[in-house]
Image (cartoon, rainbow, N blue to C red):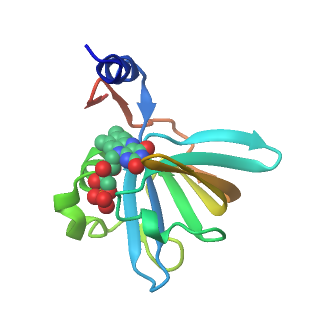
Amino acid sequence: MSIQDNFRLAMRRYIYSVSIMSNKDNAGNPNAITVSSVTSISMNPPSLLICINKSSRIHNSIELGSKFCINLLNNEQEDISNICSDEDMYDQRFKDKNWNLQNIPFLVNAQANIFCKVDKLTSYHTHSIVFGLVEDAKYADEISTLTYVDGEYK
Ligand SMILES: Cc1cc2nc3c(=O)[nH]c(=O)nc-3n(C[C@H](O)[C@H](O)[C@H](O)COP(=O)(O)O)c2cc1C
């Protein structure tokens, strides 16, 4: 097997938390993408990073200083995770009644919402690493985070 095959199978052994990154482009159109690559960096300043594929539709709308939200999903939000990770379901991404689209789009019923401003962007081959400065965070008290392991939700 190739290095890529072994790496992919090794990474499938990780347990991921599933989030949706959401934002608006310069014209005010909302975007959303399912992501598992969210990692906190620091508390001082409060910051996190996400790796975003350059071929994804949200990628072009991610600019220095632009705002976004990381919506950590709960275990009843598998459907919206599937919708936001399927390019053929693009037109359904904002049909869920739990989106608040007034300003930065966010899911009101998520496990947590972390509101950020893009502080730095680093290109790495197929992906951009997006560094977010955290401006606000909300969370639900009961912890029931949606997780993903070996290609399946748990
Ligand atoms: C559980 C899960 C985690 C994912 N994590 C990421 C990620 O961290 N970064 C990324 O660019 N794509 C990730 N994807 C893939 C994108 O969600 C998927 O390719 C999406 O369709 C791209 O958006 P688009 O259809 O608007 O182009 C993930 C998919 C799943 C199911």
- Name the quadrant containing residue 151: top left
Q: Residue drawn at (24%, 55%), measured in percent from left and top? A: 83
User: In this image, 83 relative to 48: left or right?
Assistant: left
Residue found at the far left of this picture: 88
Q: Quadrant of the C terminus?
A: top left
Q: Residue drawn at (22%, 53%), measured in percent from left and top? A: 86
Image vertical order of residue 59 relative to residue 139, above or below: below
Expressed as whole percent of the image width and height from the top left, the position of residue 65 reads 66, 70
The residue nearer to you, when weighing 21 against 55, is 55
- Name the quadrant containing residue 7: top left
The residue nearer to you, when weighing 135 against 125, is 125
The residue nearer to you, when weighing 104 against 138, is 104
Image vertical order of residue 76 relative to residue 2, above or below: below
Residue found at the far top of this picture: 1
Regarding residue 107, the answer to whether it shows in the image is: no
Residue found at the far right of this picture: 44
The residue nearer to you, when weighing 108 against 31, is 31
Expressed as whole percent of the image width and height from the top left, the position of residue 130 reads 58, 53
Expressed as whole percent of the image width and height from the top left, the position of residue 95 reads 26, 69
Expressed as whole percent of the image width and height from the top left, the position of residue 80 reads 29, 54
Q: How many marks?
A: 0
Image vertical order of residue 84 relative to residue 48, above or below: below
Q: Residue drawn at (53%, 72%), measured in percent from left and top? A: 104
Q: Residue drawn at (26%, 30%), measured in percent from left and top? A: 152
Regarding residue 144, the answer to whether it shows in the image is: yes
Q: Quadrant of the N terminus?
A: top left
